Image (spheres, rainbow, N blue to C red):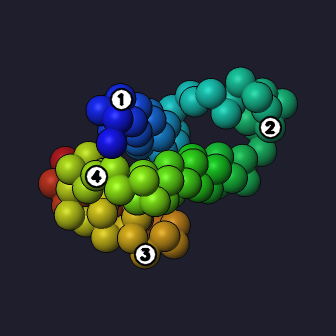
């Protein structure tokens, strides 16, 4: 396999992970720039989380199809969430692990 492909996907996975984590933290993302008029709507934050989650799942799925390793970019519970594919409150509450939750 061309060595550039794993590096490409590692960068894309890290970017999608960062975007998703920014949505968990209610921080500004590229998505906010696309729909600035929506930021005042309460459902916008859920919608933007789902969009970021789907982007992350799509990139991981493509990496799997190309046999590019992606597991090392995530901790065990994050890998479990990704493999289950369902974004729910547990994912949002426990994405960073128990330590972050207690801090």
Of the image marks 1 and 2, the number of the one nearer the N terminus: 1
Q: Which of the labelled discs sits on residue 69, or is there none?
A: 4
Q: Residue at x 51, y 32 (%)?
A: 27
The 10 Å Cα crowd at callout 4, few under 14, some 14 to 19, many 20 or more, is: few
Q: Which of 8 and 41 is in front in this view?
A: 8
Q: Which of 16 and 43 is in front in this view?
A: 16
Q: Please state if 46 lies on the left or on the right of 36 as rendered.
A: left
Real-space Cα distance between discs 2 and 4? 36 Å
| Residue bearing the label numbered 1 | 4
- Viewer-side label of 1, 4: 1
Q: Which of the labelled discs sits on residue 38, or is there none?
A: 2
- Viewer-side label of 2, 3: 3
Determine whether the residue tagged by mark 4 lies in a helix, strand or loop: loop
Residue 93 x/y as whole percent: 37, 61
Residue 23 x/y as whole percent: 52, 42
- Viewer-side label of 3, 1: 1
Of the image marks 2 and 3, the number of the one nearer the N terminus: 2
Real-space Cα distance between discs 3 and 1? 28 Å
């Amino acid at each position: 396999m061309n060595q550039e492909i794993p590096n490409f996907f590692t960068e894309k996975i890290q970017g999608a992970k960062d975007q998703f984590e920014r949505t968990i933290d209610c921080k500004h993302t590229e998505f906010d720039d696309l729909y600035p008029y929506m930021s005042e709507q309460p459902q916008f934050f859920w919608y933007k989380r789902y969009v970021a989650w789907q982007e992350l799942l799509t990139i991981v799925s493509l990496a799997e199809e190309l046999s590019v390793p992606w597991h090392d970019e995530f901790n065990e519970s994050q890998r479990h969430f990704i493999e289950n594919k369902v974004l729910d409150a547990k994912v949002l509450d426990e994405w960073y692990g128990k330590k972050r939750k207690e801090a």
